[in-house]
Structure formats: structure tokens, C-alpha cells
Image: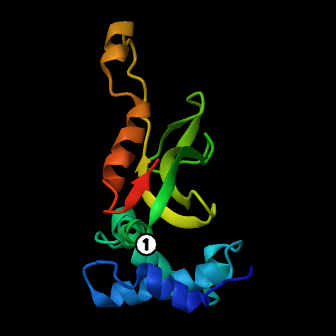
Amino acid sequence: MEFTLDPGQWAEEQFGTCDLGDQRRTRRAVKLAAQVASHPDGSTPKQTGTWSECKAAYRLFDEEEVTFEALTEPHFRQTRERSAGHCLLLGDTTELDFGKYRQVQGLGPTGNGSGNGFLLHSSLMVESETEAIVGLAGQELFYRKPRPKGESRYDQSQRARESEVWGRVINQVGRPAEGVRYT
């Protein structure tokens, strides 16, 4: 894969300001991001290169302060700050399915309810004139709730709608800076 930036420089820009509760965790996140960017198609053991580096990555992800939000917010903020002129916010939801036989705690139903996984709604910011990708302006990772047994149609109609994620991510992105317009 060809990078405009060196993977280490890119990783520092994207993850160097993460608040993970300890500066050593932030340094580890930067190092891991550079390893992943250098070999995006590899598994974690292949990306990290050694067993000790792989274990360090798994320990990092096991830390309570190392959350999806803590790792991604600096990038979202940088994307929104870099925008100028007229920007398009392109939203879409991706479903990640780990299959129905894989027993992983914390996943929710996917597809028609037969799989297990989660959903990720993203807002990609693109410059309208040049069509250049600015970055991700916001994301929300969420899980479907299993449908309660015996739920009536009325009860179902009163439940929160999955489509509400679109509004939550728009709220997360917020208002554009002065001189910037979002569509």
C-alpha cells in the first residue's frame, strides 16, 4: 500500500493526542496504528511482527480507558477542523457479522437475527469541489438488541429505531465552523 505520509507520521498525527489515561498507552496506540497502517491486510500477529508486540496490542485493547471513542475522537476533531468551504457528509451503516456459531460476548443479532456482530455508522467528510476525502467526521458503534419474546406490534413500535443513529452521528459532527458549509 502506498502512503502519502510515512505510517509512523500518520499514526502520530491521528493517535498522538488520544486520552487513554496514561501516556504509555497513547505511545503504544501510535506504534500499533503505524504497524497496522504498514500492513493493513494482515492479522494482528502479522502486523505486530513478534509475539511480545502482539501481546502488547491485546493488553492495550483490554484497558478500560482504551475505548472506541477515546481512540477515534482525535481523528474526528481533526477532520472537522480541517474542513473549509463546502463539504459533503456521507453517512452509511456497516454491519460486521461474526457468524452465528462464534460465541463472543457483547455482540448483538445481525442480518435477519441469525448472526452475531455489531453495526458501525460513519459520516465521511468529502470536499464538494475536489471530491477529496477529508476524513471521518463522526462514527457510532452500536448493537442491535434481541427482540423480546412475545413482543406485541405496539411494543415494537415504541422501541427506539435503529435509524435514529443517523441523527445521533449528525449531532456528534455538530455545526460547521464559520465559513464552512455541510451538506
Q: Disc 1 residue type?
A: Arg
Left or right: 147 as drawn, with respect to 63: right
Q: How is the image coloured?
A: rainbow
Residue found at the very far left of the displayed protein: 21
Relative depth, front residue between 145 and 179: 179
Toward which corner of the image does residue 150 lie, by quadrant?
top left
> Which residue is found at the position 29% from the left and 69% from the top?
64
Residue 12, compared with residue 99, is above or below; it is: below
Q: Tell me how many marks there are.
A: 1
> Which residue is found at the position 50% from the left and 88% from the top?
31
Relative depth, front residue between 129 and 1: 129
> Which residue is found at the position 43% from the left and 87% from the top?
28
Quarter of the image that includes the N terminus: bottom right
x and y, in percent, of residue 5 in the image: 61, 87
Toward which corner of the image does residue 179 lie, by quadrant?
bottom left
Secondary-structure class at tag 1:
helix
> Which residue is found at the position 61% from the left and 66% from the top?
132
Residue 1, compared with residue 52, is above or below; it is: above
Relative depth, front residue between 91 and 100: 91
Residue 45, compared with residue 90, is above or below; it is: below
The residue labelled by disc 1 is: 82
x and y, in percent, of residue 176 in the image: 34, 58
Assess disc 1: are there few (<14), some (14-19) or many (≥20) residues with their C-alpha within 10 Å of its C-alpha.
few
